[in-house]
Amino acid sequence: MGNHVRPVLSAVRVHPVKSVAGRALGEAAVEPWGLAGDRRWMLIGPDSRCVTQREQPRLALAAAEALSGSGVRVSAPGLEPLTVEVPEPVATTAVGLFRDKVEAVPAGPAADAWFSEYLGTDVRLVHLDDPARRRPIDPRYSLPGETVSFADGYPLLAATTASLDALNLLIAQGDHADEGPLPMDRFRPNIVVDGTAPWSEDEWSRIRVGEVVFRVAKPCGRCVVTTTDQRTAERGKEPLRTLARHRRFGDKLVFGQNLVPEDTGTIRVGDAVEFLEPGP
């Protein structure tokens, strides 16, 4: 990998509600559709389409914690925290998530009112009750039967500390140097790997993290969410300005890699990370 440091898993993060601040964990179970508790809840607007930080940057200031019974506890400035139980899947509603139509279960009026008050606009919270069959991964990058949660497109997102350091050096040399250095939370990864060379993830095809093997589906194209300060909800120009100059692949500005689990297990901070040859 261009150095002699042993690559390790340095961070694990789950985001129980899509686009809301998540939590760092010491370990997480890997399910076929992503980390346990990650992006199983999502906000939708009156048109039943997803609402994210793209439209509502203040979602960055709200937080969500997955509870042991698969419910979620949400908090936000100016509001009392709310615990939302997993709704009974007695009725589902079709929701739009980018190009996908997904069946989801309404969380109920208390959750809807809480988030609507916080954002100052009408939104509803929904739950993904059956990730094993609700939302197939893009067939161009998946095997038959592989599914994903309410994540943008793939079960996990991986990033490396070395590439973030390299990106921050490039930002420091650009027109908006005052916006850097950027923290890793701008990119909202599930796992962060230390001990690699910058941009080495461009060459990954399969990786093993602890006991779990992942297939690398495709590089992650980045959007305006990365320009949103996750602590203030204010937006700037970076990192998209610098990614456009240095990390443009076709029409995508790339940082990180999308992963699909090949098996299940538990990953832990400190686990060794190995880079494997393409599988059968």
Image (cartoon, rainbow, N blue to C red):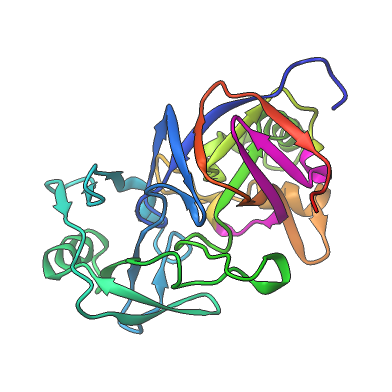
Q: Which residues are magenta?
A: 201-224
Q: Is residue 85 visible?
A: yes
- Name the quarter where the C terminus is drawn: bottom right
> Residue 35: where, in percent of width, then height?
46, 46
Question: Which residue is more in the foreground, 198 or 175?
Answer: 198
Image quadrant assignment for residue 129 = bottom left
Residue extending farthest to the right is: 2
- Name the quarter where the N terminus is drawn: top right
Residue extending farthest to the top is: 4
Total marks placed: 0
Q: Residue at x 55, y 71 (%)?
A: 136
Question: Which residue is more in the foreground, 4 or 211?
Answer: 211
Is 242 positioned to the left or the right of 13 in the image? right
Up the image or down, 72 lies above or below 29; here it is below
> Residue 197: where, in percent of width, then height?
80, 28
Within the magenta stretch, is there residue 219? yes
Up the image or down, 181 lies above or below 59; here it is above
> Residue 8: where, in percent of width, then height?
64, 24
Image quadrant assignment for residue 275 = top right
> Residue 183: where, in percent of width, then height?
55, 33
Question: Which residue is more in the foreground, 176 or 135?
Answer: 135
Q: Residue at x 73, y 18 (%)?
A: 6
Within the magenta stretch, is there residue 213? yes
Is 272 positioned to the left or the right of 51 in the image? right
Q: Residue at x 55, y 79 (%)?
A: 99
Up the image or down, 172 lies above or below 205; here it is above
Image quadrant assignment for residue 154 = bottom right
Is 68 positioned to the left or the right of 215 in the image? left
Q: Is residue 181 visible?
A: no
